[in-house]
Amino acid sequence: MNAWTGVGYLSPFATWGAFPGHTPDDIQSGHGVVHNGLLLARPERTVVRGPFRPFPRSWASGSLALTPVPPWFVHNRTAATTGERLVRFAAAPRWRKLPGVFASALRG
C-alpha cells in the first residue's frame, strides 16, 4: 500500500510469490513462495506500507515520512548517483565505499 513493491521483495522476511491453493491446471498467480526468512507455515501475503505523501509535504499535514527521500520517488535528486554507487559496492564490496553511498542517499 503506497510503497514500491520492490521494498517488499528486497526484505528477506517478507514472503513473495503466488497466493496458495491454485492447482497446476489453474495456476493464476504462480506456484510457491520465496523469501520466507521467518519460516512461517503457509504464508498468504505480505503487506508493505509507506507514507502517502513524501517529505516535506507530509510534515505539513502532520504525518510521518521517509527521510531521506527513497530512490524510487521521482523527485529524488540523487537517485542515479546513489544507484550507481550501490551497484559499484555490490560488484566489489569495500568498507571505504560506504560513506559515499550514504552521503549520496542522505542528500536525496
Image (spheres, rainbow, N blue to C red):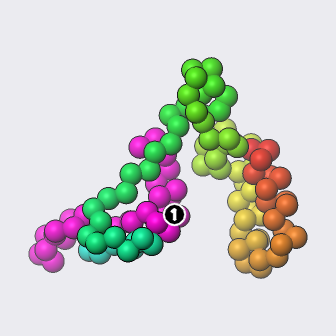
Taking the spot 16% from the left edge, 69% from the top edge, the residue there is 22
Q: Quadrant of residue 98?
A: bottom right
The residue furthest right is 96
Taking the spot 52% from the left edge, 37% from the top edge, the residue there is 51
Residue 48 rendering spot, x and y as whole percentages: 44, 50
Amino acid at the residue labelled 1: Ser
Looking at the picture, tell me which residue is in the foreground, 74 or 50: 50
Residue that mark 1 sits on: 11
Density class for disc 1 (Cα within 10 Å; few <14, some 14-19, many ≥20) is few
Q: Is residue 66 above or below residue 33?
A: above
The reply to whether the magenta stretch includes residue 6 is yes
Q: Would residue 27 be found to the left or right of residue 51 on screen?
A: left
For the stretch drawn in magenta, the main secondary structure is loop
Q: Would residue 86 be found to the left or right of residue 5 on screen?
A: right
Q: Is residue 50 above or below residue 21?
A: above
Residue 99 visible here: yes
Which residues are the magenta region? 1-29
